[in-house]
Image: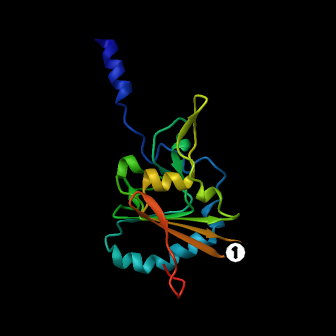
Amino acid sequence: MVQSQRVIDETFRPFPDHTQLPESDGTFVKNFHEHPQSVILTDSIEPVLQELHPDNHYAIGQDCGIYWRETDPPEKGAEAPDWFYVPGVPPRLDGKFRRSYVLWREYVTPLIALEFASGNGTPERDKTPLQVVKGTVQKPGKFWVYEQIVRIPYYGIFIIDTGELEVYHWEDGTYQRLTANERGHY
C-alpha cells in the first residue's frame, strides 16, 4: 500500500508556478531594456490599457517565458516572445511580479505576441512540429507553438533591419497572414 501511494504522489505532483520556472525559454535573450521597441510599445499603449482595464487586470510580458508544457529542463517547454499582452489577468501573483507566464496555471491565452527579429525572421516563422528524433524530443518551432499549441490570436513579426511587419491572425486552426490597409494599419 505504501508503494502505491508513492506512485500516486509522483503521478499527481503539482505543476510548478511562475516563481519556480526560469524566466526565459533558455535561448540567448537580451534584457528587455535592450529592446527599445518593446519598451516604447508598452509605454505608448499604457493609457489605452488603463482605460480598457481600470482594475489593472492585464499583463505585459517582455522577453519572459510563456510556459506551454512541463519539461525537463523547464525552458524546453517555453517560448519567450519579445513582447506579449494578456488581458484579464493580474500583473502580480501573490504580491510578486510575474517572472513568466504559465498557461497551465492561468488558462488565458495571450491576445498578442510580437517578435522583433534582428535577422530575416526565419526562426520566428519556424513551423517545425513537436517531434521525437532518435528518442529525443526536439524543440518545436516558435510559429508552430504559437499557432498549434498556445493559439495566440494575433502574432506579429517585426523585421528590424527592413522595418517590415508581418501580422498573423489565428483562424480555423491556422495563422492567416493579414494585409495592411492603405494607411499601413492592421
Disc 1 residue type (three-letter) = Thr
Give me the residue at 43% from left, 80% from top.
47
The x and y percentages for residue 160 are 67, 71
Q: Front-most of 27 and 42? A: 27
Residue at point 44% right, 50% down? 149
The x, y position of residue 116, in whole percent, is: 62, 66
| Residue at the spot 36% in from the left edge and 52% down from the top edge | 106
Taking the image as shown, residue 155 lies to the left or right of residue 55, namely right
Vertical order, 159 against 65 (above or below): below
Residue 40, compared with residue 111, is above or below; it is: below
Q: Secondary structure at mark 1?
A: loop
**What residue would you read off at disc 1?**
162
Q: Position of residue 63 (x, y in %)?
A: 57, 59
* Residue 103 appears in view: yes
- Mark 1 surroundings within 10 Å by alpha-carbon count, few (fewer than 14), some (14 through 19), many (20 or more): few
Q: Is residue 65 visible?
A: no
Task: Give me the residue at 53% from left, 88% from top.
Answer: 183
Name the foreground residue: 73 vs 33: 73
* Residue at the bottom extreme, as displayed: 183
Q: Nearer the viewer, residue 1 or 96?
A: 1
Q: How many marks?
A: 1
- The percent coordinates of residue 125 (x first, y second) are 59, 58
Q: Is residue 133 above or below residue 9?
A: below
Identify the colour scheme used: rainbow
Residue 52 lies in what quarter of the image?
Answer: bottom left
Name the residue at the left extreme.
Answer: 1
Q: Quadrant of the N terminus?
A: top left
